[in-house]
């Protein structure tokens, strides 16, 4: 369980395929606080730490994860958003995030707004995911509020702190992002579907 509040950025230092799996090594300033078997969200994808060496650690992504997220497009040198699992009893500053990506979205527009930015994303309407105005969405692991919800499209506003401390600053039109839709909304949608 995560909150969508990014702790730090990590830098990819190695990508090593093995069969259909991909071993990803990341250099991070939180490595010395990690342990083997710990869950860490990488651009919103929950992965398990399998090795630690000095200031780097390694996680492994399986084929299904590579197929359903933007991990398969990562390159050495890329910066990824990192968040360790939530501590019980701690404040929930973002929203409930599972670290399970629902689908990929595509950045279609970026506009500046006198000190902040508006990013617009589209996603596949065929997957049944929805957003609502002022509802929560997770983009590359970042907990955000939807400011403009349309069918298969939404926008978010990004403040300077988020822009500077996440990989939003590297987004361009066409950038593929990991989307995790609000878990409460998914349960409500499922229950309505079962009763109808």
Image (cartoon, rainbow, N blue to C red):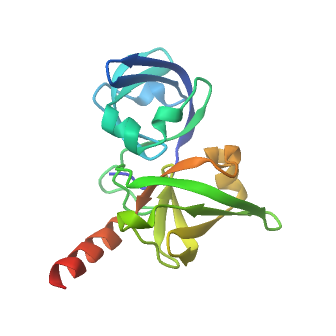
State the count of labels. 0
Q: In the orientation shown, which residue stands out farthest toward the top?
A: 53
Left or right of residue 196, residue 82 in this image? right
Foreground residue among 16 and 30: 16
Q: Considering only vertical position in the picture, is 148 above or below 42?
A: below
Above or below, 122 relative to 85: below
The answer to whether 160 appears left or right of 102 in the picture is right
Residue furthest out toward the right: 114
Q: Position of residue 34 (x, y in %)?
A: 39, 29
Compared to residue 160, the image places residue 183 above or below, namely below
Taking the view exactly as shown, the residue that stands out farthest to the left is 195
> Residue at the location (42% across, 56% down)?
3
Residue 27 position, x and y percent, is 54, 24
The foreground one among 118 and 108 is 108
Quadrant, the C terminus: bottom left
**At x 52% / y 44%, what residue is drawn?**
7
Instruction: Please tell me which residue is depicted at 50% across the width and 75% down the height of the picture.
Output: 151
Is 108 left, or right, of 19 in this rendering? right
- Check the image and name the residue furthest to the bottom: 196
Along the viewing direction, whichever of 106 and 139 lies nearer the viewer:
106
What residue sits 39% from the left and 44% below the top?
68
Picture coordinates of residue 83 (x, y %)?
A: 46, 43
Decide: is 139 above or below 18. below
């Amino acid at each position: 369980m995560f909150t969508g509040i990014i702790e730090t950025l990590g830098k990819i230092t190695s990508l090593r395929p093995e069969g259909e799996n991909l071993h990803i090594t990341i250099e991070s300033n939180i490595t010395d606080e990690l342990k083997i078997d710990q869950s860490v969200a990488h651009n919103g994808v929950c992965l398990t730490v399998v090795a630690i060496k000095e200031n780097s650690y390694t996680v492994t992504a399986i084929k299904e994860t590579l197929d359903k997220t933007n991990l398969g497009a990562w390159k050495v040198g890329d910066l990824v958003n990192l968040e360790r699992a939530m501590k019980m009893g701690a404040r929930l500053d973002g929203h409930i995030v599972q670290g399970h990506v629902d689908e990929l979205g595509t950045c279609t527009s970026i506009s500046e707004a006198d000190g902040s930015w508006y990013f617009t994303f589209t996603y596949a309407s065929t997957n049944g995911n929805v957003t609502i105005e002022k509802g929560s969405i997770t983009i590359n692991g970042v907990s955000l509020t939807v400011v403009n919800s349309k069918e298969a499209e939404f926008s978010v506003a990004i403040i300077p702190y988020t822009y500077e401390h996440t990989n939003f600053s590297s987004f361009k039109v066409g950038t593929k992002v990991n989307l995790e839709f609000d878990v409460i909304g998914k349960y409500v949608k499922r229950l309505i579907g079962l009763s109808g």
